[in-house]
Amino acid sequence: MEDPIFHDLQSICHGGEDVTRESFQQAITLGTDFLELSKIIAPLCQQLRLFADLQQDVMEMRSPADASAFIMDVSSFLEELECPYRQLMAVPLPERLASTANRLLLLDFLIGELQAARLNYFNNGPESKKGQALSPSTENLKKIVIALNLSAPPPDIDAARLFARLEGKLKETLETAPPGTLGKPLLTSALSPEQWKEVEKINDSMCAEYRLRREMLLKRFDVTVQSFSWSDKAKAKKAELEKVYVPLRKAMSVESRVTAADILAARDDLLRVEKTSSHSVRKYTQCSINRLVMGEVPDRGGRTNETSVPARDMPGFRPREDAGGSRGGGHRGGGRRGDVMSGRGQQRVQHGHFRGGRGGGGDRARWNP
């Protein structure tokens, strides 16, 4: 039971000094010496008092002479919390925290009450009691505070102090994380307010475009599922199909959840995008419907930056030159209503005259009907 409670103290951020394994063992095993125990209990009770709106309080001991006052404060605090454990409420005061089992029981009870009080505070805090819906920014701040195990910020705190506190906690958390957990940001320069306004306009335009695309894809999805229901077998299982399809379809929204804040959250791993058709990705998408997974294929080239100019195996194009005169000699004979045309193999009957081809001379023949 000791290890789970110790890990809970490490993760709950109880507001006091960091609890080491040595200080934790001293707090639960030193008999009538409650000095180390008070360093853990007092911060827990102070946070509970804040989140649960309690009247009683427990102060940290300054010397061993404060042991009696500490036990009385803890007993009053547990009574206000309506503690159900007889070992902590019904036995004489000196015996309530004298054993290791009772101290562990006290820590376990206070940790559970603090976790429940935090959730209750953030879900049913002053804003919710007044019937006012929380803004998206407030909701996100709530999630950040809960994720970082921070105590509730005071009502009069300003934005600069709040974000400075969050930044400090984030840096402290990242120092304990494995290397490369977060990655480097894609946006490395600061943008002015005017530039952020332009970013918002660009994001709104792209969201409107992708809304149309999602509407089209969802319409295709609806039509495809509807076509499946036309078969006789599907008609007999209409209720089963709707049971599976309707919840999934309701979760699909046409609205995009991408905002300008995603630019700040973007990391350099977005620059490495694997194609959905690549072998490294497809090996994880194999299923009973799509069992065929193609292996590695040879590189077929075709990249423009790797090709060279082909050798010229035919002469280049050049315009046709003018011959500068008519072929053959002689003169073109005259006709009554037209001229004789000279051409390559062309023959023309015009207005009763048979005109010759190449060469000179007069009318070679005349045909009279």
Image: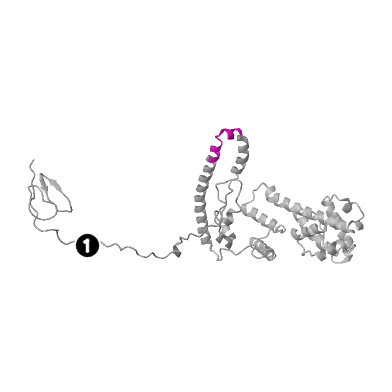
Query: Residue 142 vs residue 42: left or right?
Result: left
Local crowd at mark 1 within 10 Å, few (<14), some, or many (≥20)? few
SS assignment for the magenta stretch, majority:
helix
Residue type at mark 1: give it: Glu
Residue 229 picture location, percent across and down: 56, 36
The answer to which quarter of the image holds residue 305 is bottom left
Q: Is residue 279 above or below residue 63?
A: above
Relative depth, front residue between 234 and 184: 234
Query: Residue 93 vs residue 290: left or right?
Result: right
Mark 1 lies on residue:
321
Residue at image position (62%, 54%) is 137
Q: Is residue 358 above or below residue 312?
A: above
The image quadrant where one finds the N terminus is bottom right
Query: Does 232 appear in magenta?
Result: yes
Residue at image position (53%, 40%) is 224
Residue 26 picture location, percent across and down: 85, 64
Query: Residue 191 vs residue 316: left or right?
Result: right
Residue 328 in view (yes/no): yes
Relative depth, front residue between 181 and 335: 335
Relative depth, front residue between 340 and 262: 340
Residue 275 picture location, percent across and down: 54, 56
Residue 267 in view (yes/no): no
Q: Which residues are magenta?
A: 224-236
Total numbered labels placed on residues in the image: 1
Residue 330 picture location, percent across and down: 8, 57
Query: Does 197 appear in magenta?
Result: no
